[in-house]
Image (spheres, rainbow, N blue to C red):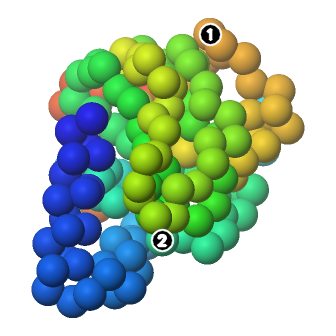
Amino acid sequence: MTIQIHALLALLLVSELTGPALAQTSLSQSLPIAARVALSGQVIELEVARTEQQQQIGLMGRQNLPANRGMVFLFDSPRFTRFWMGYCFIPLDMIFIRKGRIVEFAQSAQPCPTGENCPQYPPKGVLADQVLELKAGQVQALKLKINDPISFKFFSAEAPLPLSQQRDPGLK
């Protein structure tokens, strides 16, 4: 909810200063590839959304996302989490993770390009310390299941892990 409110406030501020069309295109980012994950034998390169600002923007404004790319959101500790698809243009699969295991999915979450009346995923929320966003259809294509282990390899000094996750032996 906090991420949604901050993103909406950022959009409103940009809208007031520059007009609505620029506001929508201004809320996009391209972070460096700073991690990877192997799922069902497929290696996926990941952007890492670590800061609050990076997490607020996420994959907003993207026109496409290859099957071998995604974004992982890191939280310092598990938190009650719901994501929304405001100002997104492509459907996504969301994988909610806690302590290195998949705890919930939101498959083929539909874009909400206007940012108005956007649903939240999962609707009731879930306790998670990481969220992985992939191209829609990847959860099914990779045959992922609840409670599957998931481990990321982080390799960029630009996106260090939160301290609470640096000591986790499941992460390499």
35 or 76, nearer to the observer:
76
- Residue at 82% x, 32% y is 140
Q: Residue 164, percent across and down?
A: 22, 24
Neighbour class for label 1 at 10 Å: few (<14), some, many (≥20)?
Answer: few
Q: Which residue is mark 1?
A: 147
Which residue is pictured at 45% across the width and 35% down the height?
120
> Position of 26 compared to 40: left or right?
left
Q: Are marks 1 and 2 in contact (CB under 8 Å)?
A: no
Q: Residue at x 51, y 64 (%)?
A: 113
Residue 162 appears at what percent x and percent y?
23, 36
The numbered mark at residue 82 is none
**What residue is disc 2 on?**
61
- Residue 9 is left or right of residue 4, and the answer is left
Amino acid type, mark 1? Asn
Residue drawn at (17%, 59%), measured in percent from left and top? 9
Image quarter (top left, top right, bottom left or bottom right) of the N terminus? top left
- One can see residue 159 in this view: no
Q: Is residue 122 above or below residue 120?
A: above
**The residue under label 2 is which amino acid type?**
Gly
Locate residue 30, reporting x and y percent. 43, 72
- For the residue pair 108 and 152, the one nearer the viewer reads as 108
Point out residue 101 in the picture as x, y percentages from the top left corner.
54, 16
* Callout 2 secondary element: loop
Nearer-N-terminus badge (1/2): 2
Residue furthest to the top: 147
**Helix, strand or loop at disc 1?**
loop
